[in-house]
Amino acid sequence: MINRFNQFGLSMIELLVALAISSFLILGVTQIYIDNKKSYYFQQGQAENNDTSRFIIYTLDNELQKIGYRRRPDLKYESIFKASDGFAKGEVIKVDAENKLRFRYQPHSTEDYACDGSSVSESDFSDINSIYKGVNLLPRVVTIEFDKDSGVLKCNGDEVVSNVTEFSFLYAIPVNNTNSRAGLKYVTFDDLTNANKVKGIRYRALISSNMKNLADFEDSKALDTFYKEVDDKPDSRAIYQLVNKTVMLRNLTSW
């Protein structure tokens, strides 16, 4: 007589099949988590670059448009902008280096803040409603400088924007080197012979995300704009964004 026994539990084959299915499920869930995390960080990097771009445009446009502002435009520049702080008499723009720009203007009111947050004291505007009171107001000197080693854009020595990979100025001057409005050309610091002829300023900034290794490829159109040689490009796969803006100096167009 043959004894028959009922088998309880899982067989070895069933256990291996269940283990294989669970392994595939775990791998699938893990891959989804990694993809979602990567997509999240990529979106965060893009949002960070967008915020930095808007802040650069707001800060620089707000400051550059003030160059040469006079509370009394009927007075000559020489009578308002005295020789001081390295500026000649009547001079409002000083280009000291490739990535360093200094300029002067008269603050409009006590609420006219510089890019470093400084303001004019109340005593200088004791009679703000009288435009003649502000004629002798000392011009404000602002310095915009890019520190390439730290990747920081500074205003009067204070950090304004970080994560800046490259930054450059181009200066608009008359094509025939006169005050004629026939046309303008843009030159670099090396080709600028007379800062008093500048009628507009174009700035370009290459900003990068704080986190690296977010992009799938090292190729970037923004990088190609600034770097001609492959060896000069950054080796990290950060997200790069290009900011390019031109500001016409309306206070100097008729000068």
Image (cartoon, rainbow, N blue to C red):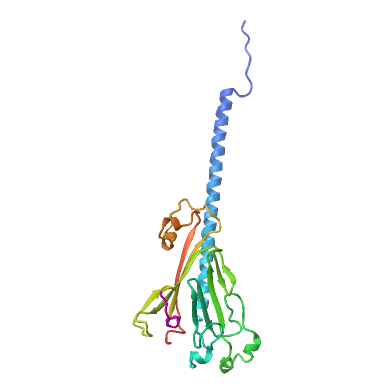
Residue sitting nearer the eye, 222 or 52 = 222
Is residue 157 left or right of 235 when viewed as pictured? right
Tell whether position 193 is magenta: yes
Please state the horizontal and vertical placement of residue 184, each as a whole percent of the image. 37, 78
Where is residue 174 shown, x and y percent of the image? 37, 81
Place residue 2 in its image quadrant: top right
At 63% across and 23% down in the image, what residue appears? 9
User: Residue at position x 61%, y 24% from top?
Assistant: 10
- x 55%, y 33%: residue: 21
- Residue 15 forms part of the magenta stretch: no
The foreground one among 119 and 191 is 191
Toward the viewer: 93 or 131? Answer: 93
Q: Residue at 54% of width from left, 49% of height from top?
A: 36
- On the question of residue 28 being in view, the answer is yes
Q: How many marks?
A: 0
**Quadrant (top left/top right/bottom left/bottom right) for the N terminus:** top right
Read off the magenta span. Answer: 191-197
Residue 181 image offset from top left, x and y in percent = 36, 83
Residue 55 visible in the snapshot = no
62 vs 24, nearest the viewer: 62
Rendered-image quadrant of the C terminus: bottom left
In the image, residue 83 sits, relative to residue 226, either above or below, namely below
Residue 152's place in the image compared with 115, above or below, is: above
The image position of residue 113, as x and y in percent, is 59, 79
